[in-house]
Image: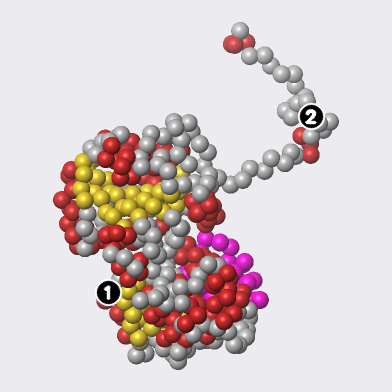
Amino acid sequence: MPEPRFADLGLPPILVQALRRAGLATAFPIQAAVIPDILDGRDVLGRAATGSGKTLAFGLPMLVRLRRGVSAPGKPRGLILAPTRELAVQIERALDDPAVALGLRLGTAVGGVPIKRQTDRLARGVDLLVATPGRVTDLIAQGAVALDAVRVVTVDEADHMAELGFLDQVTALLDRVPADSQHLLFSATLDEAVDTLVQRYLREPVEHAIDKAETTGAQPDSAMSHHVLRIRKTDKRKLATEIAARRGRTLLFVRTQYGADKLARQLRESGVPAVLLHGGRAQNQRSRALAAFADGSAPVLVATDVAARGIHVDDISLVVHVDPPADPKDYLHRAGRTARAGATGTVVTLVTDEDRDAFAALLDRAGITFTESRVHPGDRELVALTGARPPSGRPVPDPAAPPVDDTPHPRDTPGNRRRNTRPHTGFPRRRNRSAN
C-alpha cells in the first residue's frame, strides 16, 4: 500500500509546498489518520507512541483552521498546552515554517525565561500560542493573555501532564476556552486521569490509536532492540564512560540531578564531550546543551527523566539507562528517544545482580522483549553491541559553556595599562619578615 502524501490529506497547496521544501512529502500513520478529521472540525483523541510525528499531526491542521482570521493583541485563536518547556519549544520550531507559509504568527509562553519578553510578544498579537500550563496561568493573572478567543486547543502529552501534577492547571485553563471550541488531546497512554479530560472536554471525539509498529512501518524488534547488561557495581562508571566514548549520538539517563552532574563532569574529564540536562539547570543552560547535542558538537547528552519526553533530536542511535528507571512508563519514554519515525536504535540498561529480578519484572510489565548479557569493561560483546571504546583521557571543555567575551577592556589595551592597580594607602609596604 503506497504511503499517504500530505497533498492527499486536504492541506492547502501552499502548505504542501512548504513541507516539500523541508523534505516532507509523505505522512506518517498518525498524521494521515488525524489531519482530515481535524480539518473537518472534529474533536480528536489521539494515542500514539513517542516519535510518531504527532506534532505535525495536530499542528498542521490547527494552522489551517486558523488561516482565515486575525488575532487581537493578547487573544490567541489557537492554544497548544505542553508539559515541559523543551517540548513547547520543539513544537514551535516544528511549526514555524508552516506558520510562515500561511502568514500566521506563533508565540511561546514557558517558564525559565523572562516573562516580560512573552508579554511583549503577546501584545503584538499571536495566532497560535504554545505554552506550559504554569506560565500561561501566570500570564492570565497579569492580564497579558485571555483565552476567550481560542477556537482550537490541543493538550499534548496528556499522560505526562497528569504525572507532573498539572491536571488542575490544565482543567482551569480549558474552562477558560469557549465550550464550542475544537478540542484535541494527544497522549502516549490513556489512563484514568487522562480519561477525565476526555469525558469533560471532548465532544464525540474521533479516536485514533497508532502503535510503535505502525509508526515505524516495521516490526518493533527491527526498529528498536533492548538489552540488559549485567554488571558489577564497581564497573558501572567505567562501562558508562566506554560506552559514551563510542561514535554516534548517545543519550545517557541517570536517576538524580547530582548523579547527572557527576557523570557529565567525569565524562569530560575522560575526554568525552558531554552536555547535561536536568530540571535544576537554567533555561539558557538547557537550551545550549540541547543545541550542542543537536548540532553534534556534543555527541553525548546526560539527562534525568526531564528529557524522556519532548526532546526530539535526530539520529540518537543509542539510549543507555545508566540508572534503571523505576517505572515501566519511564522506561518506554526514555527508550522512545531512539528509533524515532522509522529509524532504528538500541536501548541498553546497566543492571547489577541485586537489581536484575526487579528490573526484569519492570520490562515484563512494559511488554519489552530483551536480550541479557554479562559484560565487563572492554568486552568484545560490549564493543559489538554498543561500539564502546576507551576514551582519550584528555579532558575536554563543556561544549555547552557560555561563550567567553575576549574583547579587551579599554584600560587593558597597550598604552593604557596601569603598572600597579593596588590602591595607594599612603603607607609604605611592610616586608614579610617571617618569609626570610
For the question of whether residue 38 can be seen, the reply is: no
Report the magenta residues as a range.
110-134
Identity of the residue furthest to the left in this view: 357
In the rendered image, residue 106 lying in the magenta stretch gets the answer: no
Q: Residues within 10 Å of mark 1 (few under 14, many from 20)?
A: few
Say which residue appears at 40% left-offset and 74% top-offset. 3
Residue 391, disc:
none
Say which residue appears at 46% left-offset and 65% top-offset. 87
Q: In this view, does 173 lie above or below 306?
A: below
Q: Which badge, 1 or 2, is on the more N-terminal residue? A: 1
Residue underneath mark 1: 191
In the rendered image, residue 117 lying in the magenta stretch gets the answer: yes
Residue underneath mark 2: 418
Q: Position of residue 352 (x, y in %)?
A: 21, 43
Q: What residue type is labelled 2?
A: Arg
Identity of the residue furthest to the right in this view: 415
The label nearer to you, 1 versus 2, is 1
| Secondary element at image label 2 | loop
Say which residue appears at 63% left-offset and 72% top-offset. 121
Say which residue appears at 72% left-offset and 41% top-offset. 407
Query: Colour scheme in the image?
Result: secondary structure
Q: How crowded is mark 2: few (under 14 residues within 10 Å), some or many (20 or more)?
A: few
Q: What residue type is labelled 1?
A: Asp
Image quarter where the C terminus lies is: top right
Between residue 33 and residue 360, name the one nearer to us. Answer: 33
